[in-house]
């Protein structure tokens, strides 16, 4: 079972159309249960559209990084420390 933070890194590629088919399916499944991520995908889609209209290319890495950290912050505020980054702990949980 994944939590939202594990989807963050894939949401950008999902919206960008770069994610694998299996990842897309997983994300879509998660989106059905998760309004937070739906809002996020919606926001990302708008950003991507704006970006593509303006520059005719994929999201720049810098923008991705900004979105990602904004997302992580938002999710952390909402879910607290449980929703930590993908960094695994040193020892066992
Ligand atoms: Zn979610």
Image (cartoon, grey):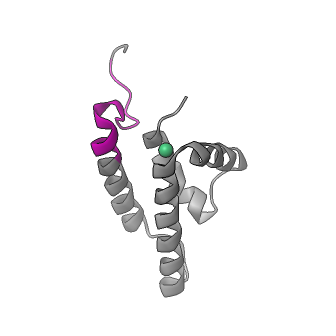
Kindly identify the residue that appears in the image at 34 percent across and 15 percent down. Answer: 91
Kindly identify the residue that appears in the image at 46 percent across and 66 percent down. Answer: 43
- Residue 16 is a magenta residue: no
Tell me if residue 9 can be seen: no
Q: Position of residue 24 (x, y in %)?
A: 66, 50
Above or below, 56 against 66 in this view is below
Q: Nearer the viewer, residue 71 or 85?
A: 71
In what quadrant of the picture does the N terminus appear? top right
Span highlighted in magenta in the image: 75-90
Kindly identify the residue that appears in the image at 36 percent across and 35 percent down. Answer: 83
Furthest residue toward right:
21
In what quadrant of the picture does the C terminus appear? top left
Q: Is residue 51 left or right of residue 91?
A: right
Kindly identify the residue that appears in the image at 54 percent across and 77 percent down. Answer: 49
Tell me if residue 84 can be seen: yes
Q: Position of residue 81 (x, y in %)?
A: 28, 32
Q: Position of residue 92 (x, y in %)?
A: 37, 13
Furthest residue toward top:
92
The number of discs equals: 0
Q: Quadrant of residue 68?
A: bottom left
Q: Nearer the viewer, residue 39 or 17?
A: 39
Furthest residue toward bottom:
54
- Residue 79 is a magenta residue: yes
Q: Position of residue 33 (x, y in %)?
A: 57, 42
């Amino acid at each position: 079972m994944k939590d939202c933070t594990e989807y963050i890194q894939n949401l950008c590629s999902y919206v960008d159309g770069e994610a694998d088919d299996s990842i897309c399916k997983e994300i879509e499944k998660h989106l059905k249960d998760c309004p937070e991520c739906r809002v996020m995908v919606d926001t990302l889609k708008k950003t991507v559209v704006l970006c593509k209209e303006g520059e005719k290319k994929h999201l720049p890495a810098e923008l991705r990084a900004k979105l990602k950290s904004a997302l992580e912050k938002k999710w952390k505020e909402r879910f607290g420390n449980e929703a930590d980054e993908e960094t695994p702990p040193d020892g066992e949980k």
